[in-house]
Amino acid sequence: MNKLLFIIVSALFLSGCNRIDVHQPLTSALIPLTAGETVSQTFVANYDNLNIVRICLRNPDRVQTPIRFSLLVDKQEIRGIDFNSSNIDNTDCTRLQFTPIPNSAGQMFTASIMIYPPKESNLPSTPIFVEQYGQDLHFSTNYYQSLSSTLHESWTQFVRRLSLDPAFLLPYLLLIVITIFLCCKSSRSRS
Amino acid sequence: MTFKQIFTSKIFLLGLLIRFLVMPFTGHYDIRGINFAVYNLPFKGITNVYEVAANGPIDYLVNVNFGRDYFIYPPLTYFTLGSIMTILKPLYGGEFVNWIQGYGNDILSVVTHPQVWRYLFLMKIPYLLFDFLLLTTLLKFFSKEVDQKRALAYWWLNPIALYLPYIWGQFDIIPAAVMLLGVLSGVKGKPYRAAILFGLSASFKSYPLILLPLLAVILGKNVWQMIKLFFAGLAPFILTTIPFWGQEFFRKTVLFSWQSQKMLDFLWGIGGDDGIYPFVIGYALILLWTVYQLRSQKSALYLPMVMTLTWYYATTNFHQQWFIWVLPYLVILAVKDQKLRLIGLGVIGLFFLRLVELQANVTNELFIWLAPAFDDLPKSRYLIGLAYDLHKFRNLVNSFFVALSLFLSAYLIKKAPRTV
């Protein structure tokens, strides 16, 4: 039991957070992608430590074919992941996680998905699909942030926002105070 | 207990304080989805939300994230919540319309909106009203003050009853309260009122329709009265939905929605292309037991309801918020039979164990309204996955739940009164 608790607590403090950065959620069409074809999306990261790109791939016929994800800067691949299409999450976007890029803020990246050409794989009888909207893919990116930094940010955001809606917050606090007062009064009258 | 005794009791005030403390700061994104439909009545004067869902612009944030089939609840839900929103409209303010529409796709603007805590608090006010109704109804099942005090504590401080409406933000407490009122009417010897209240409850969420035959069998003096009770129960559901039957969107997403038939997802193959449904087998057994053992036993009206609902949860990939349907009856059982308190604790434990491994963003994500960074903290399912296989964990919890459901049913059958 202690070991289990140790693993969970360690994971909580060591894992940190993967925060959402760029998000293009709209979807209006599916692009079919067969062996040898590539689809790519450019984006500008807003933060340092870019570490996840989620691309919404669909594999309705559960075909198994090798795929390469590449993250490029100026046409140079700086991160790459090989994976099999059986790992595609058909109900969500497929998460492609890599070592954080420390100085990613402001840089333009190209994320590309390539189905390996036929000579390196069995040609799938049906294509893999990529969700698309207009000229964009359905995708999102995350950047890594330490847990302590996330918690600190959460707390400071909360305190700052307290002053934003006084017309609600003041009567609300009054309601809380009255309830606490009545609760204490009820305890005293019993004792 | 009188109203004064309830409202001045320490347990009530403590429970109320907890509710007030969580109401503005927590909620599942679904609460926006539900109120995205609700706001059409008070803010736009639209009475047919299904028309909006079928033909409204696609670029509303809620449509984009949840799809058009998000308007899945029967009309009475939208009219009730919409009526309360109309009364509270001056407190919402005009900016609420822009907020509920989601500022294009800017999720961050929605989550960190200066008035978002006010909106969350106001959107949960209807739950508080029905929660009071449920509590006062629940207490009427007991004549001794000591039992009423226990029932007050078991319900009002129940972690599930606090979590589902106020932290998660789901409205299932509304049909649960109305159905409990129906059961009370049945126990007090008012069968038609009970059936109509079941029908009204089904007009919020359709599950009481499954329980209606059980009510008719127990409260009907003969077959003719059983039939009359059954149709009296159906009437409110039919009357409140019939104006929308002509609309294809309504038929597809509300009357015959896939969610209302989830219990048929679990199928045992028996060879060829044929199969049998475990839920239906259990339901039929409960119905037969009710016919042979519980006829005219109006005080036992809630027993087959508990058995059917727990069997439903055991054999269906149910949505966690549906669990509040059975909770008031489990409280009644725990108050009346001290041995069942252990079962009650087991239920609460399994409920929260199932919750922490759900994919539905229902743990730290509920606190994003305090600060969006909460969404980025490691998810409970991720942490569990580090220690043990998540799928096995989930299946273990499900298996324990089936065992608990079967044990509870066997126990209730043994203890139930019998028709001579």
Image (cartoon, coloured by chain):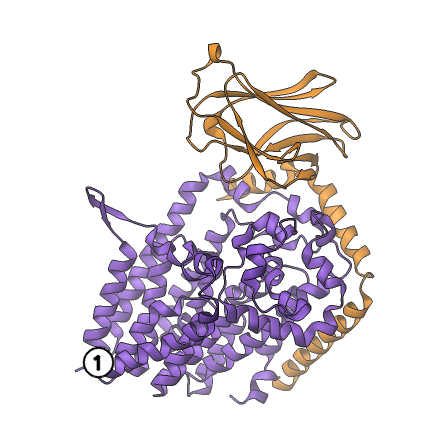
The residue nearer to you, when weighing A147 against B373, is: B373
Q: Quadrant location of residue B405?
A: bottom left
Are there few (<14), some (14-19), or many (20+) residues within 10 Å of tag 1? Answer: few
Q: Which residue is mark 1?
A: B223
Report which colour depicts chain A: orange
The residue nearer to you, when weighing A4 against B75, is: B75
The percent position of residue B130, horizontal first and vertical second, equals 54, 75
Kindly identify the residue that appears in the image at 63 percent across and 41 percent down: A26
- Quarter of the picture containing the C terminus of chain B is bottom left
Vertical order, A39 against B165 (above or below) = above
Residue B106 as seen in the image, left or right of residue B239: right
Amino acid type at image mark 1: Val
Q: How many marks?
A: 1
Kindly identify the residue that appears in the image at 67 percent across and 63 percent down: B120
Residue B63 as seen in the image, left or right of residue B274: right
Circle 1 sits in a helix, a strand or a loop, which is it? Answer: helix
Q: Quadrant location of residue A50?
A: top right
The percent position of residue B150, horizontal first and vertical second, equals 47, 78
Kindly identify the residue that appears in the image at 72 percent across and 75 percent down: A175
Report which colour depicts chain B: purple
The percent position of residue B21, horizontal first and vertical second, equals 67, 67
Q: On what subunit does the disc labeled 1 rest? A: B
